[in-house]
Image: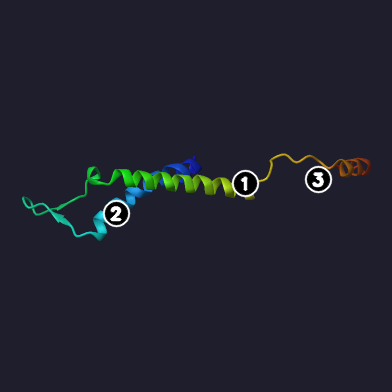
Amino acid sequence: MIRLLLVIVLPLVAPYVAWYCWKIFLEPPKIDPATGDQVAPSIVDAPRGKLLIAAFVLLILSVGGFLVAHYAIGQDPYQPIPEERYEQERRSGQGYQ
């Protein structure tokens, strides 16, 4: 479940979160003239096409990186016992370790 979150969901959400944080913290605040309060950025105003492209690029990079790392690090779960060693240990009575 954590792999699904880190490899798929996080890259899809990250550009939208970054855009929202950029609007809040790095741009001058927009003030509502009627109330004098700061107006929060609206996701409707977001450049959704560009953010979606960025999200898919991040998704492809994260899935690709995961697959490359898994191929480089992972091992086959089953490795057969070498026959010669099995016969030697069976004759000596130690058993295979």
**Where is 34 relative to 1, above or below?**
below
Depth check, mark 1 against mark 3: the one in front is: 1
Q: Residues within 10 Å of mark 2 (few under 14, many from 20)?
A: few
Residue indicated by mark 3: 97
Depth check, mark 1 against mark 2: the one in front is: 1
Query: Callout 3: helix, strand or loop?
Result: loop
- Residue at 63% from the left image edge and 50% from the top image edge: 72
User: Spatial distance from mark 2 to mark 3, Cα to Cα?
Assistant: 56 Å
Extreme residue toward the right, this view: 91
Q: Residues within 10 Å of mark 3 (few under 14, many from 20)?
A: few
Expressed as whole percent of the image width and height from the top left, the position of residue 49 reads 31, 43
Badge number at residue 71: 1
Specify which label sits upstream in the sequence, 1 or 2.
2
Give the quadrant of residue 76.
top right
Quadrant (top left/top right/bottom left/bottom right) for the C terminus: top right
Q: Give 2 or 95, whichever is nearer the viewer.
A: 2
User: Spatial distance from mark 1 to mark 2, Cα to Cα?
Assistant: 35 Å
